[in-house]
Image (tube, helix red, strand yellow):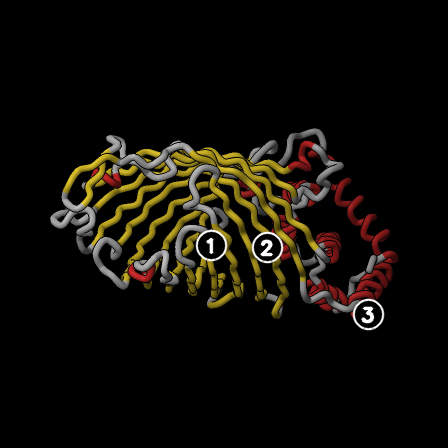
Amino acid sequence: MIFKLHILKLIYVSIFLLISTSAFSNEKNITYMQILQKPNDLDLNLKYAQQQGKMGNFKQTISTLERMNMLYPENTEIKLYLLSVLVQVDSPEKANTIIAEMKLRKDLSSEDLETLQEIETELKDREPGLWAFNLDTSAGSVFTDNVNSVSKTRMKSESDSVVGFNSAKHDRTLSGGIGFSATRPIGEESSLLINLSHSLSEQYQETDDDYQSYGFTFGLDTIFLGQSVSPYLMLSKSDYQTDADSFSMMYGAGSFFSIGERNSISYGYSFSDSKGNQNSTDATADETNSIGHSFTLGHDFIFNELITTNISLGYSDSDAKIDAGNDYETYDVGFGLNFAFPWAYIAVSNSYSFNDYKKADTSVSSSIVRSDVTNTFDIMVTKAIGDIFPAIDPNRSFFVNLSYEKIQSEANLLNYDYITDSFSLSFARSFSFN
């Protein structure tokens, strides 16, 4: 429902705010670094909030206005501006809280009081849309020069002998996916997520990556002891063309908290149970049935509104039904550098994975227990189609992604000593039904 009566009055408030910040009209955009340097500057922060609102970054707009509202609790214009944004993003709980606070003020003008009453009436008559529904689609292709991880020497160990590694190297894979999500708020600090997904993969020359997968996710975002906590449950099934079907169940929780305005710490734990459907064509599929535990720790840093960094640490342990060649521990460390340019989003990352296996795989070598380290470097460029063709994608929900990945594996066994380069191009589109 459109708030016809009070919008005109809120426009006057916006005009007032525009006039109050006219001293900055001839200057370049306010950066996040300037806000950090002058967090109490009213004019500077209002200008920044306006800029973020024009860019559609309402979360940052609301955050800035809420902070200014705390610093200047008697400023009616800030409250009305914040109220107008909350109405725009459909946040009735916070809007009603501000209305209740303003109605208690004795210095409120009759015009402002009338505006608040009109908005309050509209909010009460309005049936809240608790559920939000989204459809996400994607399609892409991956081109790789070593699809089977063929060793650098094209040799491999097999039953204590060295033989040729003659598998194909160059190939490409086409993929597509669709997901349907339903979310709803629970109170003011929690939200529920239900997601159903289906994806397809088709390898051009070989058939190892020909499969269909089905997924179900149930998640909750909430606040606990001042930290954001997200427990989840994930179920999936993959139907392979030339391999046994696989089933997996994973549950866990992730959490993060902020330290100041530029640092945040994240951590999480997950448990997984993976099973292979042994059948007549793959009599050993269930040998890799495994239970896994994973722990993660990360740090994100906002250098400025353009550059952010992230550091990640991880540890995982996998215990399979048949230990030999399947049980292992992995230690991960990674670093990422992200650039939010006006013309594109670029993410660069470099990570290392140290894998220590627990028992020797006699089909490869009876005397050497596999141990390897994998270095993965990747760079991804993401661009909204709406930035180029606004008429086609006015809401900027259609994205094109171009990425490059290089994997270098060093191992104590020839089989796992390889280099792989991959290029991928994909498109993703999101549709909202609200």
Q: Which residue is the site of mark 2?
A: 179
The local crowd at label 2, few if under 14, some if 14 to 19, many if 20 or more residues have their Cα within 10 Å, is: some
Residue 125 seen anywhere in this rendered image of the structure:
yes
Distance (Cα) linking label 2 and label 1? 31 Å
Out of 218 and 162, give the one closest to the viewer. 162
Of mark 3 and mark 1, the one earlier in the sequence is 3
Task: Evaluate if marks 3 and 2 touch, with contact meaning CB atoms under 8 Å apart.
Answer: no
Q: Is residue 86 left or right of residue 344?
A: right
* Residue 346: % across, % down: 51, 35
Disc 1 residue type (three-letter):
Ser
Disc 2 residue type (three-letter):
Gly
Q: Which residue is the site of mark 1?
A: 258
Q: Quadrant of the C terminus?
A: bottom right
Disc 3 residue type (three-letter):
Asp
Residue under the point 84% across and 64% down: 118
Under tag 1, what secondary structure? Answer: strand
The local crowd at label 3, few if under 14, some if 14 to 19, many if 20 or more residues have their Cα within 10 Å, is: few
Q: Which residue is the site of mark 3?
A: 125
Residue under the point 57% across and 43% down: 139
Residue under the point 44% across and 41% down: 309
Q: Quadrant of residue 135?
A: bottom right
* Residue 290: % across, % down: 32, 62
Under tag 2, what secondary structure? Answer: strand
Distance (Cα) linking label 3 and label 2? 33 Å
Mark 3 vs mark 2: in front:
2
Q: Quadrant of the N terminus?
A: bottom right
Out of 418 and 170, give the one closest to the viewer. 170
